[in-house]
Amino acid sequence: MAVRVQEADFDPGAELEALSSGDTEIGAVVSFTGLVRGAGITGMTLEHYPGMTEKALAEIETKAHARWPLQGALIIHRIGLLSPGARIVFVATASRHRKAAFESAEFIMDYLKTRAPFWKKEAGTDGTSRWVEARDADDSATERWQR
């Protein structure tokens, strides 16, 4: 299992190299790097429940491995106070074929948005703060994988 919850930033290039290094059976690597948007905010604080969060991420990764023939997968999610433009999440999947790599990466991201126990609080440029609510579009994206 390759799941990390951390405060520290990460280097997407180094993570991709580590995921695929030495495995000549890999024909495709797909990655997604999510960034903190800065529209109207000065920062975002991410909280989680240690132990429970890592378990949930590992379960999502296990589901992806069960659905697609993956050579590897990696999920990194940051916590703590992040500024606009900061990297917040990284998902990478490696497979022999591109379709499995693309689909599994999208599946993992959809499940992270709806099933991972993170709480996000945005600090507004006007001095207010608000908890980020779940969106119907995220639920719909996850539901399509259950069909």
Image (cartoon, grey):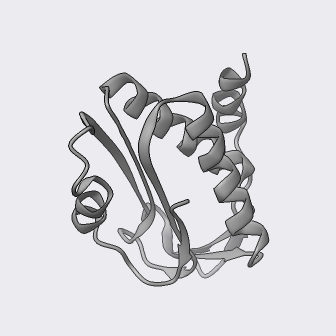
Q: Residue 129 appears at what percent x and percent y?
A: 68, 75
Please state which of residues 127 and 140 is positioned toward the viewer in this rendering.
Answer: 140
Please state which of residues 111 and 2 is positioned toward the viewer in this rendering.
Answer: 2
Picture layout, residue 61 above or below residue 128 = above
Q: Residue at x 65, y 57 (%)?
A: 58
Whether residue 135 sits left or right of residue 96 in the image: it is right
Please state which of residues 38 and 28 is positioned toward the viewer in this rendering.
Answer: 28
Where's the N terminus, which quadrant?
bottom right
Picture layout, residue 30 above or below residue 4 = above
Q: Residue at x 42, y 27 (%)?
A: 100
Q: Residue at x 67, y 32 (%)?
A: 142
Whether residue 91 sits left or right of residue 138 in the image: it is left
User: Outermost residue, top direction?
Assistant: 147
Tell me how many marks there are: 0
Could one spot residue 118 in this view of the protein?
no
Q: Residue at x 27, y 35 (%)?
A: 28
Please state which of residues 111 and 124 is positioned toward the viewer in this rendering.
Answer: 111
Picture layout, residue 125 above or below residue 93 = below
Whether residue 66 sits left or right of residue 73 in the image: it is right
Q: Residue 109 appears at what percent x and percent y?
A: 54, 44
Q: Residue 119 appears at what percent x and percent y?
A: 72, 67
